[in-house]
Image: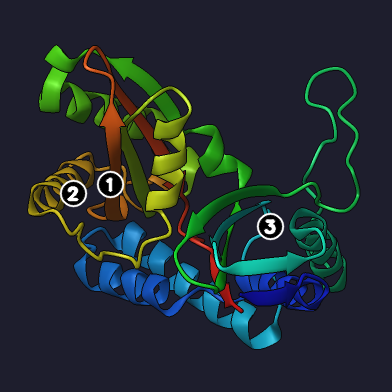
Amino acid sequence: MRVIDTEILVERIAEMCIQAATCLPEDVMSGLQKAKTEEKSPVGSAILDVLLENAALAKRERVPICQDTGVAVFFVDLGHEAVLQGDLYEAISKGTALGYKRGYLRMSIAGEPLFDRKNTGTNTPPIVHVRLVPGDALRITLAAKGGGSENMSAMAMLKPSDGRAGVEKFVLETVRKAGGNACPPMVVGIGLGGNFEIAPYLAKKALLRQLGEPHPDSRYADFEREMLELINKTGIGPQGLGGKVTALAVHVEYAPCHIASLPVAVNFNCHVARHAVLEV
């Protein structure tokens, strides 16, 4: 058994928050650079130039890539042979508050959603998903999700008879409805199966995969490629102003589901596809 003191996580999580907000991962930068070579629209090409320059400036000056520094969403893989000394959720929350304050990142959390939408002033509480896995390690992935792309996400409970065609139709309708509001070129996460709460989780988790890394199941890898092609044929283009590159990648995750159901969810990452990883 391995003992992990959660207090050591606070500083490292704070740094994760700043890193994610200011430095686009290399896979996303490569995706934007590739998009630049493929975009035929002069306006779309000029927009991609600005996005690449903005990302480079943010990294160099250590300032946020986007003013919306998002909800801090953490995916935690905890080895079942590890023993936590202290409260993991408290450590993640303290680290988030510290990082957003230290990095001068925008606080974006309303403590109550409907009647009294006061800002908590700390960007907490974060959203934390914990999964038990073999071993004694702790792996924490942060996905900072902005409101614009998140607001355009959608979920549907299709019937099994809707099949692949029904899923394609729903995804394309969701992309078209999002238009420029999701700040394309975006990454599209699709969650299939599970149930009403699992499909959206899968869609969001799909966005954590290395940009463009195909699904290990060849059937789903083919589906990802087909959906990317269909999405990029919509003509929405960079920032919704027309062009060839609407999405940088499409990633799918699936889970078993009820024989009477075909849940499907779509979650978007805008071009600021932020994530950071901590391994302890």
Q: Position of residue 68 (x, y in %)?
A: 68, 53
Question: Mark 3 falls on what kind of element?
Answer: loop
In this picture, residue 274 sits left or right of residue 17: left
Instruction: Please name the residue that numbered disc 3 is placed on.
Output: 69
Q: Amino acid at mark 2?
A: Glu
At horizontal 42% and vertical 62% (from top left) the residue drawn is 47
- The residue indicated by pointer 2 is 224
Location of residue 139 with respect to 280 vertically, above or below: above
Q: Residues within 10 Å of mark 2 (few under 14, many from 20)?
A: many
Q: Is residue 130 left or right of residue 186?
A: right
- Earlier sequence position, callout 2 versus callout 3: 3
Instruction: Report which quarter residue 215 is drawn in.
Output: bottom left
In the picture, measured across the screen, residue 216 lies left or right of residue 119, that is left
Give the labeled residue for mark 1.
252
CB within 8 Å, label 3 to label 1? no
Callout 1: helix, strand or loop? strand
Q: Where does residue 82 sit, x and y in percent of width and height?
A: 61, 69
Q: Please rate how many residues cluster around mark 3, counting C-alpha atoms within 10 Å: few if below 14, some from 14 to 19, many from 20.
A: many
Q: Is residue 20 above or below residue 247?
A: below
Q: Are marks 1 and 2 in contact (CB under 8 Å)?
A: yes
Between residue 210 and residue 237, name the one nearer to us.
210
Return the mark for residue 205.
none
Give the residue displayed 32% in from the left and 40% down from the top.
190
Q: Residue at x 13, y 45 (%)?
A: 223
The structure residue drawn at horizontal position 81% and vertical position 49%, both measured from the top left corner, is 124
**Quarter the N terminus occupies:** bottom right
The reply to whether the C-beta atoms of the residues labelled 2 and 3 are less than 8 Å apart is no
Along the polypeptide, which appears first: circle 3 or circle 1?
3
Percent across and percent down for residue 182 are 47, 43
